[in-house]
Image (cartoon, rainbow, N blue to C red):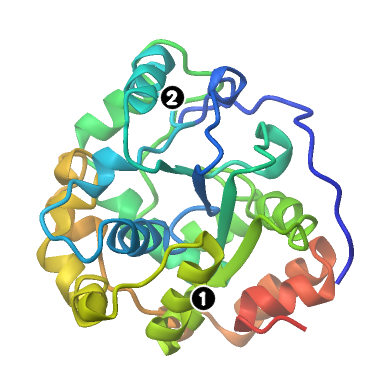
Amino acid sequence: MGSAASPVKTRELNNHHFDSTIWNDFKFRNDDIIISTYAKSGTTWMQQIITQLLFNGEEGLEVAEMSPWLDLRVPPKDLKLAAVEAQTHRRFLKTHLPVDALVFGAKAKYIYIGRDGRDVVWSLYNHHVNANAAWYAALNDTPGRVGPPIEPPPASILQYYNDWLEKDGFPFWSFWENARTWWEIRDLPNVLFVHFSNLKKDMPGEIRRIAEFLETPIDESKWDDILRHCSFDYMKAHATQSVPLGGAFWDGGAETFIHKGTNGRWRDVLSAEDSARYEKRAASELESDCAHWLATGELR
């Protein structure tokens, strides 16, 4: 592992989803928690885990409202900043930005969740193909969009994968720069790396690791409740509390957003050559240890 200095914001990132300028006006608190992913890498799962740790296994919490995506450009940033400033609980916000488009809080805790890019694409396609007219209107038609609108996806998931790989995250944003910039700061004491596959393999162990990082003691009498409430089946059954606007932007509602929670679905579709193109691209874009971690969850 290398060493890392505290990062400095060097640019803004604006598109149909992003307004990174909101971080310029955000007022950090010393105990803030920032959840970061590329997208479709376990963000909602991590929000649920942190909610359960902070609120001691409580049910019925409006997780999506409590933990907003700060750099999503809707609703307008002045409304969002006021709402976040009014929160009295320990705040846990999410971002999908690369590090160099963030204002970095020296005392905030950052949890970065990684996932193999091929699994990301399969989850992203479900997210995109089930988006309804309200989703497109919010992203394309509200004031402040920079760049082209986001269009409906092709009918073929293989075509979607090829476009995403060849056009560096199209029609969303770069997967490689997201992973690369976070990898560069993985040694900072206020940054924790978590992998989707490891959460699947050993959720209890990973939750305890997260709790230790957040310096949040676990009430052992509530441990079974915490685990149950963080299970995929529970989250699927209570999806309206975890998904933005209760899932109103997706056909089928919130349960569409929390889809399968599985890895490897691409193996039934991608040829060996298709898959190898991803691996070759990962090797060219990332340090070998970073590419290995994204593919396996193993830090070496």
The x and y percentages for residue 176 are 70, 55
Instruction: Name which residue lies at 48% across and 64% down.
Output: 120
| Distance in Å between CA atoms under marks 2 and 1 | 32 Å
Is 41 situated above or below 133?
A: below
* In the foreground, 243 or 91: 91
**Left or right of residue 175, residue 72 in this image:** left
Q: Amino acid at mark 2?
A: Arg
* Res. 106 mark: none
Q: Quadrant of the N terminus?
A: bottom right
Q: Which residue is denoted by mark 2 in the rendering?
A: 73
Q: Callout 1 environment at 10 Å: few (<14), some (14 to 19), or many (20+)?
A: some
The x and y percentages for residue 53 are 34, 63
**Does dot 1 land on a helix, a strand or a loop?**
helix
* In the foreground, 51 or 256: 51
Residue 266 appears in the picture as rendered: no
Residue 249 appears in the picture as rendered: yes
Q: Amino acid at mark 1?
A: Arg
Instruction: Name which residue lies at 26% across and 79% down.
Output: 223
Q: Quadrant of residue 149?
A: top left
Q: Which residue is denoted by mark 1 in the rendering?
A: 209
The x and y percentages for residue 21 are 59, 20
